[in-house]
Amino acid sequence: MNFTYANSAQIFFGQGQIASVATAIDADAKVLVIYGGGSIKKNGVYDQVKEALSGHKWIEFSGVEPNPTVETLDKAVALAKSENVDFILAVGGGSVIDGSKYVAAAALYAGEGWDILERKYQVEKAIPIGAILTLPATGSETNMGAVVTKSATQTKLSFLSPAVLPRFAVLDPDVMKTLPERQLVNGLVDAWVHICEQYLTSPQGAMVQDGYAEALLKNLLVLAADFDNRDNDSWRANLMWTANQALNGLIGSGVSQDWSTHMIGHELTAMFGVDHARSLAIIQPSLMRNQIKYKKAKLEQMAVNVFGLSEGEDLSEACIQAIEAFYNGLDVQTSFADYEGTKDEAVDAVIAKLQGNGMLVIGENQSIDIATSRAIVAQAF
Ligand code: NZQ
Ligand code: ZN
């Protein structure tokens, strides 16, 4: 094991913490507040932000859509440049926070912002960002990743840079009270898969990473089993903290990771509009079965340590079935048929996109080539 780890994002956790923004941002900074389609206006979050920023100069940009598009975000980039903003405050879910990371980086880059997603430009500087999280799922509030879509070509790509790690994140579970049930479920599933992508590889003897990943997975199982009692402070707080810890870099430190489910899932979102989390539930079981020879030992470990299954034959397949049952129990589908035309045409289209985006060989062992991706998608459709 060999790694360097830092996560300098300050976390303000708990009820009433949005007020902390007042002192977390320099008093003389000119702030650009970025938000989405208006949920924050309906649930009082916007008013709390306004109150917290009453001593600051600030402007706003709204209308960042779920799966944020470069077409929309470039308007915010132009605003950030023309208004010379010193700080960006993202108020929303993963889409708003990711979008704000793109704006923060693109505003300090002279070329086309999309270069960042095509990895033609590695982001080295960005306007500082803070985040007020309203939907626990992605972990974007304290990580350095972002995913942006070009709607003109239905291309969904990601970038990573320490420069866009938020300086702080406010995690007030009260903001979740207005979340539609669908989004709460998405949060449980996305966080679950984030842990799996860093855990379901091969045994690495990493006791801290494995043990913490297993604790987080067990939290999500408990919260899902207790879904009927979700209108509860403790339920909300535990989901918010678990989803944050699932993707803040810690459990992935020094171990191999496999983000193939995400890579293939992103194509389903870009092409068919499937919610991010739901795209993962469609692909992951099929991918696990396809890659079982590499993942058998960790699936067996997960079966015992997370699901409490006893040693026995076919424990790895039993683990995949337990994962499917977790999704299905939340009314999340593990296969997909909502495409036009034949199954072959739909699979071909997904594979062509994956290929076009350069995902020719993926997986922690580079064992998923295009033919294997095709088999995985065909099994999921
Ligand atoms: O736009 P508004 O009106 O705010 O409504 C949003 C949106 O329609 C609504 N919402 C958010 N908070 C709410 C609320 N509605 C009522 N009450 C609240 N408190 O929820 C809808 C979905 O929001 P979105 O931000 O799109 O969801 P999520 O947080 O799941 O983010 C998904 C995006 O994050 C990317 C995904 O690919 C996708 O684009 N990801 C980012 C990652 C990262 N940066 O590390 C990792 C993830 O794997 C993921 O790929
Ligand atoms: Zn995700």
Image: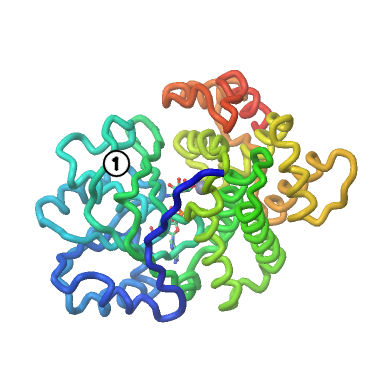
In the picture, measured across the screen, residue 213 lies left or right of residue 144, that is: right
> Type of residue at label 1?
Val
Observer able to see residue 349:
yes
Residue linked to disc 1? 70
Q: Nearer the viewer, residue 282 or 218?
A: 218
Disc 1: CA contacts within 10 A as few (<14), some (14-19) or many (>=20): many
Q: Quadrant of residue 10?
A: bottom left
Q: Viewer-proximal residue, 344 or 89? A: 89
Q: Please indicate whether residue 124 sits to the left or right of residue 378 in the image.
A: left
How far from the left and from the top, in percent, is residue 196? 62, 47
Ligand 1 near label 1 (Cβ, under 8 Å)? Answer: no
Where does residue 87 sit, x and y in percent of width and height?
21, 61
Q: Is residue 316 above or below residue 8?
A: above
Work out which quarter of the rendered image holds the C terminus and state it: top right
In the image, farthest residue toward the top = 371
Q: Is residue 1 above or below residue 348?
A: below
Identify the residue shown where x is 40% and y is 36%.
157
x 39%, y 69%: residue: 170
Query: Residue reaching furthest front?
Result: 2
Q: How is the image coloured?
A: rainbow
Can the viewer see residue 138?
no
Using the rendered view, name the quadrant where residue 298 is placed.
Answer: top right
Dot 1 lies on which element? Answer: helix
Q: Residue at x 44, y 69 (%)?
A: 171
* Quadrant location of the N terminus in the rendered image: top right
Nearer to us in this view, 266 or 248: 248
